Image: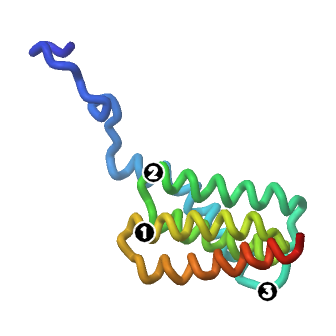
Amino acid sequence: PGPEGERPEARDGIRCSLSSDSALCRPLDEAFSLWKQLLEHPGVPGVRSPEQSVSSLQLLAALYRLQGKPIQALESFLLLRSLCQRLGDNLGTANSLCQITRILLQLECPSQAQVFLEELELCLGEDEGSE
């Protein structure tokens, strides 16, 4: 309990200024920019490990989401979808489409979410057809 007998709230222990928030985001923003440059050209990018690249983009999106930056998380999942499609990874594509849809619904954009939901249904249909 605090001096007045009240318990301090969790957020009281976490004080971030805008400059420290910006400093924390800078490496993520730089990573996002590099991924965007790498994926702006068609075809499979020349990376050492496609699996590790997928994991890196998943982590980037998750970190943006944890920081309360849904637009950046959405953009990261869009890059992830693009990479997974190029790699022929239907499960990865489906997962990224689920995450994109979820974020759009949280942002109260149901018509945009519907577009990605329909793409997800097509993706899952292709996956079932290949089994």
Image location of residue 16, percent across then percent down: 34, 42
Residue 120 placed where, x, y %?
A: 64, 75
The reply to whether callout 2 and callout 1 are in contact (CB within 8 Å) is no
**Number of residues whose C-alpha sits closer than 10 Å to that of mark 3, classed few (under 14), some (14–19) or many (20 or more):** few
Q: Amino acid at mark 2?
A: Gln
The disc, 2 or 1, on the residue closer to the chain's N-terminal end is 2
Instruction: Say which of 91 and 52 sits in front.
Output: 91
> Considering only order in the chain, which callout, 3 or 2, is on the residue closer to the N terminus?
3
Callout 1: SS: helix
In depth, the one of 111 and 31 nearer the eye is 111
Q: Which of the two discs, 2 and 1, sits closer to the camera?
A: 1
For disc 3, the marked residue is 42
Label 2 SS: loop
* Image coordinates for residue 117, horizontal then vertical, percent: 57, 76
Q: Secondary structure at mark 3?
A: loop
Mark drawn on residue 105: 1
Quarter of the rendering occupied by the N terminus = top left
Corner quadrant of residue 96 = bottom right
State how far apart marks 1 and 3 are (Cα).
29 Å
Please give the name of the residue rendered at 9% of the width and 15% of the height, measured from the top-left corner. 4
Which residue is tagged 2? 67
Q: Nearer the viewer, mark 1 or mark 3?
A: 1
